[in-house]
Amino acid sequence: MARYIIKRLLIMVVIVWCAAIVVFTLMYLAPGDPARILLGSEADDNVIQMKRVALGIDKPYLMQLGIFMYKTFVKFDFGTSWVYNVPVMSELAERLPRTILIGFSAMILNVAIGVFLGIKAAIHEGKWQDSTIMIIAMAFISAPDFWVALMLIILFAQKLGWLPAYGIESWKSYVLPIICSCFGGIAVNARQSRSAMLEVIRADYITTARAKGQKEDVIVRKHMLPNALMPVITSLGNGLTSIVAGSPIIETVFVIPGVGAYLLTGLNSRDLPVVRSCVVFLAIFSSIAMLLTDLAYAFLDPRIKAQYASGRRTR
């Protein structure tokens, strides 16, 4: 297992480097002059050229890339925002707790509700409960985030006046963003849990457990559920990434100063240090999340654990 973890860590390093190079290249090739965008279209050409020199974007591509990789991975310097004139890491440290609060709360809700609905649908396969839950899941996964956010604002903020429409004045300001964020996850987890449970229900060991006279709730809790959670673990790995990435749409609609809104602002204003640093940060966290997901697989599935018990894969 130790050899497996070391191998995955090395792969993580390569993935993060590749992500950094790709985002740097894409932003370098993107149309538009960041200096002109920052100074405005009416700025003098000489002033724009001086701004380009000050920002370091007058150098050739390979030189800029080398400076970026050196500062990021050797000096651990993510730069200063061209728009906010604040170190990117300081801004991320301030915004990250808000994004994590929304994302983590939404993940807990969508896993708990989604798995519950998926189990209910699988147990009542072909019945009205199954059809109703699948219709709800299809509606949740089909509804765009911005539309759901606007409907929630109209209903709970404008019509009922129970919750604030935007901002982060108090804990109530997080309720609508969390509800809006968990709709899609509930649908995905419900569908995956249902499919996994249907495969487990038809397994021979479930038939054997029933033949031994075990109660149905014991069979579901001790035999079906642990084996049906494997697809859910995959969605949890993706959910961990989205927790840090945030949702630019939701954070923009509800005016939440989180990481997602920060990245979207950086893209719109061509704030290259912000975009590059956010992508590298997300690549690092995504790699860690995928590593934790693989370790969870190995912990829950004895077959995977046996493959790495001797420090090598079995073919």
Image: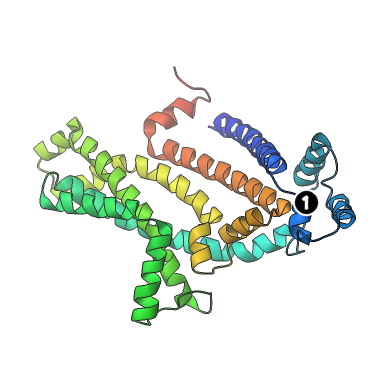
Nearest the viewer among 210 and 282 is 282
Residue drawn at 59 percent across, 56 percent down: 264
Where 69 falls versus 257 (above or below)? above
Residue drawn at 48 percent across, 22 percent down: 313
Residue 183 placement, left or right of 285: left
Residue 202 x %, y %: 17, 34
Residue 203 x %, y %: 20, 32
Q: Residues within 10 Å of mark 1 (few under 14, many from 20)?
A: some
Residue 149 x %, y %: 41, 65
Residue 136 x %, y %: 24, 55
Q: Which quadrant of the figure contains the C terminus?
A: top left
Instruction: Name the quadrant containing residue 284.
Output: top right
Instruction: Name the quadrant containing residue 51.
Output: bottom right
Nearest the viewer among 114 and 41 is 41
**For the residue marked with disc 1, what is the amino acid?**
Asp
Nearest the viewer among 247 and 1 is 247
Residue 154 visible within the image: yes
Secondary element at image label 1? loop
Residue 111 visible within the image: no
Residue 89 placement, left or right of 315: right
Residue drawn at 85 percent across, 41 percent down: 59
Q: How many marks?
A: 1
Residue 206 placement, left or right of 19: left
Residue 290 placement, left or right of 21: left
Residue drawn at 19 percent across, 38 percent down: 201
**Residue furthest to the bottom:** 161
Question: In this figure, which residue is indicated by the disc labeled 1?
Answer: 77
